[in-house]
């Protein structure tokens, strides 16, 4: 392992390792998971959940499970 490598060297070696192990397509798919997001997740979640009760959530889960079994 490179102990005193610069960030660029580490990035280059990491990309090399990913590409060797996953191939180009797999590496791209892996890296897509780390895109920089935007917005405020906490505020959006609070707005989305506003007014929901535990029963609402449970009913939604049961309904989804029922549809998946069909």
Image (cartoon, helix red, strand yellow):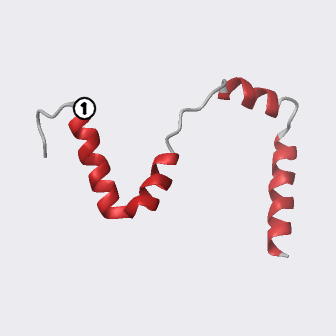
> Does dot 1 land on a helix, a strand or a loop?
helix
- Residue under the point 88% across and 31% down: 51
- Residue under the point 38% across and 62% down: 22
Task: Please give the residue where the numbered disc 1 appears in the rendered image.
Answer: 7
x and y percent of residue 19 in the render?
34, 58
In the rendered image, the quadrant that contains the C terminus is bottom right
- Residue under the point 86% across and 36% down: 52
Q: Nearer the viewer, residue 46 or 36?
A: 36
Q: Nearer the viewer, residue 69 or 39?
A: 39
x and y percent of residue 23 in the render?
38, 63
Image height check: is 39 above or below 56?
above
| Left or right: 66 in relation to 35 | right
| Left or right: 21 in relation to 13 | right
Q: Nearer the viewer, residue 28 or 3?
A: 28
Q: Nearer the viewer, residue 19 or 40?
A: 19
| Left or right: 34 in relation to 50 | left
| Left or right: 20 in relation to 24 | left
How many neighbours does mark 1 have within 10 angstroms: few (below 14), some (14-19), or many (20 or more)?
few
Q: Residue furthest bottom?
A: 70
x and y percent of residue 49 in the render?
80, 33
Location of residue 56 (image quadrant): top right
Q: How many marks?
A: 1
- Residue under the point 66% across and 24% down: 40
Image height check: is 56 above or below 23?
above
């Amino acid at each position: 392992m490179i102990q005193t490598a610069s960030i660029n060297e580490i990035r280059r070696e990491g990309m090399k390792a990913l590409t060797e192990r996953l191939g180009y397509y797999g590496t791209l798919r892996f890296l897509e998971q780390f895109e920089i997001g935007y917005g405020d997740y906490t505020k959006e979640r609070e707005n989305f959940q506003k007014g929901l009760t535990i029963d609402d959530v449970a009913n939604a889960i049961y309904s989804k499970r029922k549809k998946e079994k069909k």
